[in-house]
Image (cartoon, rainbow, N blue to C red):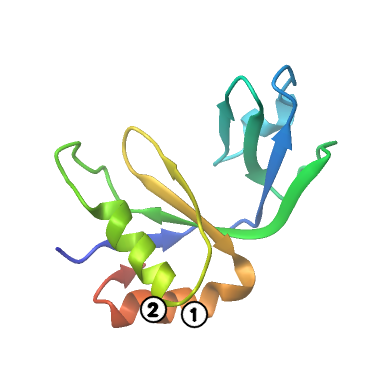
Amino acid sequence: MKSLKMKILPSEYRIYQLAPNSSIPTQVFDEEFFSVTKTEDEVSLVCSARISIESKNVEAGFSCMQVVGPLDFSLTGILSEISSVFSRENISIFAISTFNTDYILFKTVEAENVKEAFSVSGHKIL
């Protein structure tokens, strides 16, 4: 696989689990990066840790790595390669895909391990 270029976004993030009928606080929409996914069972919300949201389930302390794109839809194996690097380091991830690219959240305490692992794997973190 061709070397991937990634960048780590500057904010710290939280991942919230909300009820499926929940409203998203308006301040979320002012953020540079956020993600909302709704299913019949839940709303998953990823947003900056600067925003505090009432939720029965929240996971805090995440960094977010962006695959520098845009990525063509014909490309294969990108998430597989990324998750393999994290797996070799025994680091759990939360992946989000968009039209243009992929984002991977991981615990901020693992940031130096992540940078080293991707460098050793031949990928570049900008």
Q: Residue at x 26, y 42 (%)?
A: 70
- Tell me the tag on residue 37: none
Q: Quadrant of the N terminus?
A: bottom left
Q: Residue at x 51, y 70 (%)?
A: 91
The residue beneath circle 2 is 117
Give the residue type at disc 1.
Asn
Residue 35 appears in view? yes
Please, what is the three-letter code of the amino acid marked with disc 2? Answer: Ala
Q: Nearer the viewer, residue 43 or 25?
A: 43
Seen from the viewer's position, the closer of residues 113 and 12 is: 113
Which residue is at 82% across, 37% downward? 55
Q: Nearer the viewer, residue 53 or 18?
A: 18
Quarter-of-image position of residue 115: bottom left
Against 36, residue 96 (above or below) is: below
Q: Quadrant of residue 18?
A: top right
Q: Determine crowd level at label 1: few under 14, some 14-19, many 20+ residues with C-alpha closer than 10 A.
A: some
